[in-house]
Amino acid sequence: MFSKGVATGIPDPGTFVTLLTPIANFFSISFGVASIGLLFSISFLHLETNGFLRKSAINNLKWISTFAILWALSEMLVILLTLSNLLAQPITASLDLTSIRSYLWQTSLGKVQLTQVVIAVVIAIVIPIIRNIRGSITLFLLGMAGIITPIFQSHGSESGLHGLAIGSLIFHVIGITLWVGGLVSLFFIAPEIRNIALPRFSGVALWAAIIVSVSGVANAWTRLNFISAWSSKYAYIVIAKVVLTAILIGIGYKHRKFIINNLSGTPAMIRLIFNELFIMFVAIALGTWLSITAPPLVNEVELDVDRVLSITGVRAPAAPTVSNLLLGYEADGFILGALLVVTFLYIRGVILLSKQGVKWPIGRTISFALGIAAIDYATSGGLGLYSHFAFSFHMIAHMILGMIAPIGIILGAPITLALRVFPAGRDENERGIKGLLVAVLHSKPVAVLTHPIVALALFDGSLFIMYFTSLFGNLMTGHFGHLFMNIHFILVGMLFFHVIVGIDPNPRKVPHLVRIIVLFAAMSIHAFFSIALMSSTSLLDGGYFASLQRPWFVDLFADQKLGGSIGWAMGEIPIVIALIATFIQWVRDDAREAKRFDRNADRLVSAGKPDELAEYNNYLAKLAENDRRKN
């Protein structure tokens, strides 16, 4: 599953270390999955009372802490074994504090493993005092981040299909963690709660199985996309995992039938869960084996020959042409997977509303689809590919991700759709998924983030931090950094345009005049940023684009200035569109307010009472009459 194993081409550290390495990896992964599964269980499967954990969930906290401690200890053992493998020495010789400190602080793999240990320790310490869903969800997300972090050090980082390999592996691990971890948690749920939790887990498990299957196939294809690869040991392990996954999906189907037939409390159901868990852990063991098995190569001598591939994760494309930009495609697995998930959820929500007799505006659906398509093009399409190789194309992708696509997503009103279709609580005291979303929307952090000044600062202020410091060059040199930038552009763009032109619920009502002022401020700041970019006398990428030695756009300064001018031109257009949309919304809101006032006045008149305007006119008339009498 994760790549923490022995590097190829180094001396043998000894039989004991070689045999113990996959075992330690297996236990580290298993304890991590169990910890996160129990966190998921108390956050989403157990009943809660107005956002607070009930006794049945609190009883599981000690188990979460225990598994987190075991996760930290097993990961510490993995660190020592990895160091032994790297130095080709017995594990006892790796107990040198200087070597351990250097490994943890000076190597990327060591930093990742140290991060996992820290996250596991934080969960173990904090979870005993957690009493609300907000805290448990926070720790669940923290644990999930910890368990997927090592993926960026996996074999996929050396693959030609780098983005697809890494992204599909992230979804593969997320799916397995929810599936296996959720199943483990069922053993720790009280029988009377299990009957309530099983239906919800069954739905999660079904989609987790689909995600695991699709992502597994995509990931295997990135390594086995040539005929001779299928005769390798790596391929045999992959085939075994596919067979086990098929068996698990079959058991999952049988599991759902048990739930439908209300047999969730029978010993047969317990045996079914145990059998499913056994096969799942065998699959995890195979995944651990894969993590220390080098994938097949088309030609052994090709390893480390392609310099551009080793820097960017993709092979250098030909000179940009219209057809290359429009038809090129290099999948970013993580963003592509996320887009597929949110698109499916959006379509499912529209279908559910339709079944309830509620017609969702087609314009919102089209707007959402256009936003999703724009993100896909700017990350995985031809533009996304060339954004790795030239600053000008990077800036075009940035503008689409941060200023064009977010408008489409926001005008699609995804939060409103979610509030209409999310289920309510399973009893009278539970908030449910819908109540949880409402609580998040009314939380203090969201109130702070949706303040116009904060949204503007994140939207435009982060540009100067990212591009006029060493951060840009550092982020461009790794897949995680590039992914971080893309996600950052998307999120800050969605936040800003949600505050300005959003039709979804907002914790604060921003006056239209304030929105227009903020938009003019954004336009001015963005223009200043673009001018500063074009006026810069030094390259901002820290030598990244020079290291690629591309045969086209060889003048890096000219390309950077072109990127600045593109940013200025493309940045102004969406803001002007937002200004027009804000003005239209202002006019419509005034019209609705006038209609509401008129309806209220009509109701008062029909009831024989003067309306507010009539009362005010009478008040003014009395004041005038008093003045005449005094004179």
Image: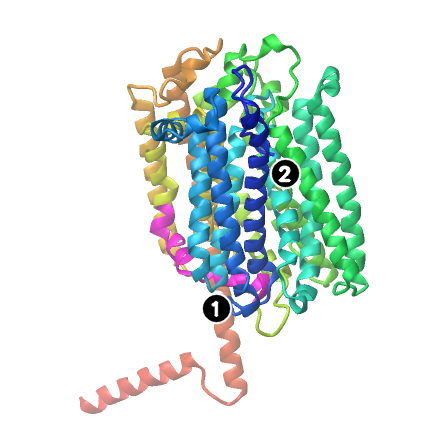
Q: Where is residue 273 in the image (x, y as percent from the top left)?
A: 72, 53
Counting other residues with Cα less than 10 Å from the Cα at mark 1, is it few (<14), some (14-19), or many (20 or more)? few
Between tags 1 and 2, which lies in front?
2
Q: Does the magenta stretch include residue 447?
A: yes
Classify the position of the N terminus by image quarter. top right
Asked if residue 404 lies left or right of residue 337, the reply is left
Q: Is residue 413 visible?
A: no
Looking at the image, is 308 positioned above or below residue 346? above
Q: Which amino acid does label 2 sit on?
A: His
- Badge 2 element: helix
Asked if residue 420 lies left or right of residue 559, the reply is right
Residue where numbered disc 1 is placed: 594
Please identify the quarter of the rendering in which residue 154 is found: top right
Q: Which of 593 and 349 is in front in this view?
A: 349
Q: What stretch is highlighted in magenta?
A: 431-456
Looking at the image, is 320 positioned above or below residue 450? above
**Numbered circle sitting on residue 172:** 2
Looking at the image, is 585 positioned above or below residue 620? above
Q: What residue type is labelled 1?
A: Ala
Q: Position of residue 582 (x, y in %)?
A: 45, 51
Counting other residues with Cα less than 10 Å from the Cα at mark 2, is it few (<14), some (14-19), or many (20 or more)? many
